[in-house]
Image (cartoon, helix red, strand yellow):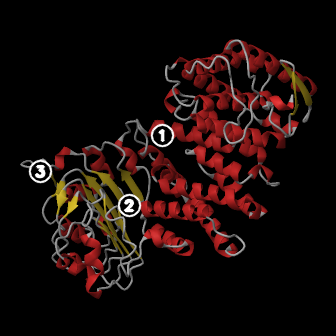
Amino acid sequence: MEVPSLFNIALKKCINYFGHARIEINEDVSPKLKQIMFDQITYSHYIFHPSIFTIFSVNEIDLTSNIITENHVQEIAKCDFKTLKINCSLKTYQDADNVGVYDIVGLIKASVNPETRKKLETLKVATKSAYRGDWMDTILRYLPNLQTLVCKQKATTGFPPLSMTFPQLKSLDVSCISLSYINGISCLINLETLIMRNLTVSVSEDLHELFALRLLKHLDVSRYQKNGEGECKTIEYLVQDNKVLPKLEFIDFRTDCENIGHIDGLTVLTSVDLRASLKLLGHFYEQQQFLMVDRVFKKINGLIIDGINYNKNQELLNTCFKTFVHYIDNVSLIESIARTSAICAIMCSVTYCTFYNQHMTRTQRSRIAQVLLDSRTERAYNYWWLFNCAKLHTVPELNVVGYFQRVVIHISNVFGHYSRIRNFEDVGHGLRTMDALYPRLDEAARRQITEIPRVLSALQAMFDKCSRSPTGFIVTNDRRAIGLAAYTIEVLARSVTLMRFRALRPHLTRFCVRRIRVIEWTRIFVPQCRLLDGIEVFSIEEVATPEEWATVMFDRLEEYIKQVYEHHQETRQLTFQHFGRVVDTNVQGTPLFQIISQGEI
């Protein structure tokens, strides 16, 4: 069994143990491993013992995805950390007289011990209620080294009063349903990032203090909902009277106004080019403004699709490519799940590989291959897609056995439980990757692949679930359902023994027959078309029943598998006679089943 599998098994056992007991962890365990284990626990859907927070020495505690209790607050108060993310679901801190008001200061003081409060650099809290009193002033006094403060509220509010300057704060997010004024914001003299979504101002004087922030680089005054025509007053007030923010690099209005390009002196995301977008990526990533990172990645993806000449922009595009890979390479497990920016980076890489594949060097392909081999692939659809678009199966030095085993394990793990079966495309791309890698495996390498039975169990469960569901469960498109079956057949023909295929055959048959009956497609199985990104399947244009098609199809597939395993040949020419038509199939170089047009017969 490969190392990643052993690690995953050990990790699950540790998490299960930590969930029910208080133990001391070996101090020799690396900080990186401690952080990984801690992240796995805090993002678990299961109830865990609050004492786990005292086990690890971690820089960040994130309780936004769990229903926190008073015990959690008491336990994390014993820890030393630099970043705290916490929701506000505890009723203990709700105002007794007004349930719409929350004592955010009380919660923070209960969560952060006197020693940690001097070290805390990032605080992120969220609530449906408004905060009590001069909460920001109190928090900034209590946390003297706080650099990033995010306090989002699902309430209408004004900017909290400040009694003095707070030079330590560099990033502030006070987004809410409606922010009515910002008096006092000039006290935050060293702000570089300011996010005030849904800011509503009545006169230009309401923004007077904003222009005192001479170090401001990033300003977000966008709205969650678009205003009516002629209501873009915030934009007008910001650009009138020749007032400037000398360090400002980016301003975001998002839905506040569609036609903002005509306003002089305004720089918005929709107007930047590729070079400026790369600069913005670095800025937003440094500021941990991952929503903006996501949006810049989408902008870059659109720029590439619109067409950038490679020969004229080779150096810039290479820098762009390195940025994508670097971002994917360095994103953590939790970040890749919680943030769409990681997926956007992968999508940008896919687009790049699609448009400039012929210009990619062997080194670049090798780097992507190594990144994918080392990465956790919870969002595997995108990883397999990138693998195929970059044609990584052609990389000479690729660890084929390791990657093949990784794909097999992923499919069996993710789709081996009903609760995890959500999207057949993930399975399809995983199977396609297996299909691309298989010709690279020699007989000795193929014997190292020990996880195939787990894949068969996963596929059996998936096909059974799809067959029983009136709506087809995960498969909502019948062409795609047939394409998924074709992928499965392709891989089975190369990877399993005859005995194993016979065990899976009834489940696969029920799946195929069920999907055809859903649309009453009794005369034509698959028209002459390509399915799932070019993988071709054999089609019989006229059959009596779907059951007849399945019987003929799988009888011949059994015969094919039998011959492959009898002769143990890498490449074998095989002749199929399908109702008078002949298909010559090369096991290594072409798909097993090909569409034969009537004109070619």
Secondary element under disc 1, as helix, strand or loop, is helix
Left or right: 122, with 507 as reference point: left
The answer to whether mark 3 and mark 2 are in CB contact below 8 A is no
| Residue 165 visible to an observer of this rendering | no
Left or right: 595, with 65 as reference point: right
Q: Taking 199 as reference, is 384 above or below it?
A: above
Which label sits on residue 15?
1
Q: Amino acid at mark 3?
A: Asp
Q: What residue is pinned by disc 3? A: 95
* Front position among marks 3 and 1: 3
When asked about the image quadrant of residue 546, the answer is top right
Q: Position of residue 432 (x, y in %)?
A: 70, 39
Q: Amino acid at mark 2?
A: Phe
* Mark 2 Cα-neighbour bin, 10 Å: few <14, some 14–19, many ≥20: many
323 or 197: nearer the viewer? 197
When asked about the image quadrant of residue 10, the answer is top right
Q: Amino acid at mark 1?
A: Ile
| Residue 227 visible to an observer of this rendering | yes
Q: What residue is pinned by disc 2? A: 81
Quarter holding the C terminus is top right
Q: CA distance from mark 3 to mark 1?
A: 36 Å
* Mark 1 Cα-neighbour bin, 10 Å: few <14, some 14–19, many ≥20: some
